């Protein structure tokens, strides 16, 4: 899966939870889920569950703690898919 395809999938997953439309329009690898998109911690858990379902992977607690921005999410997803 290419970087752009992965970002597009992540965009679809996080869309229902965002609080900042402008930041969402400019979503990139450097976008922070909490600081930029204003996603609260409860919704971050929902996003992680949605990512698990979408990619058919299981995320450990340490993965979840690291998944604070788009780049970290992409690295973790790719690592799990390659495993």
Image: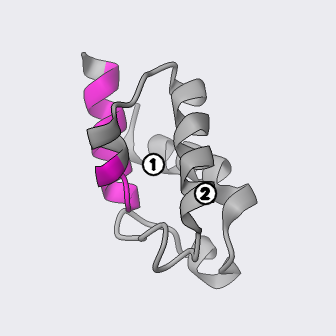
- Image coordinates of residue 58 in percent, x first then y, are 42, 23
Asked if residue 70 lies left or right of residue 49, the reply is left
Q: Nearer the viewer, mark 1 or mark 2?
A: 2
Q: Residue at x 66, y 49 (%)?
A: 12
- Image coordinates of residue 67 in percent, x first then y, are 36, 52
Viewer-proximal residue, 10 or 44?
A: 44
Task: Name the quarter where the N terminus is drawn.
Answer: top left
Task: Name the quarter where the C terminus is drawn.
Answer: top left
Q: Residues within 10 Å of mark 2 (few under 14, many from 20)?
A: few
Asked if residue 22 lies left or right of residue 30, the reply is right
Q: Earlier in the sequence, mark 1 or mark 2?
A: 1
Viewer-proximal residue, 32 or 60?
A: 60
Q: Residue at x 69, y 61 (%)?
A: 17
Q: Residues within 10 Å of mark 1 (few under 14, many from 20)?
A: few
Say which residue label 1 marks: 4
Viewer-proximal residue, 51 or 2?
A: 51
Residue 69 against residue 26 in the figure, above or below: above
Say which residue label 2 marks: 42
What secondary structure is found at the residue carrying circle 1?
helix
Where does the magenta region start and end? 65-81
- Image coordinates of residue 2 in percent, x first then y, are 39, 38
């Amino acid at each position: 899966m290419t970087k752009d395809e992965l970002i597009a999938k992540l965009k679809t997953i996080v869309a229902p939870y965002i609080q900042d439309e402008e930041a969402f329009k400019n979503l990139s690898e450097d976008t922070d889920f909490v600081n930029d998109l204003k996603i609260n911690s409860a919704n971050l858990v929902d996003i992680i569950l949605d990512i698990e379902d979408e990619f058919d992977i299981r995320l450990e607690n340490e993965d979840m703690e690291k998944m604070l921005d788009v780049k970290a999410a992409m690295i973790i997803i790719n690592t799990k898919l390659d495993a």
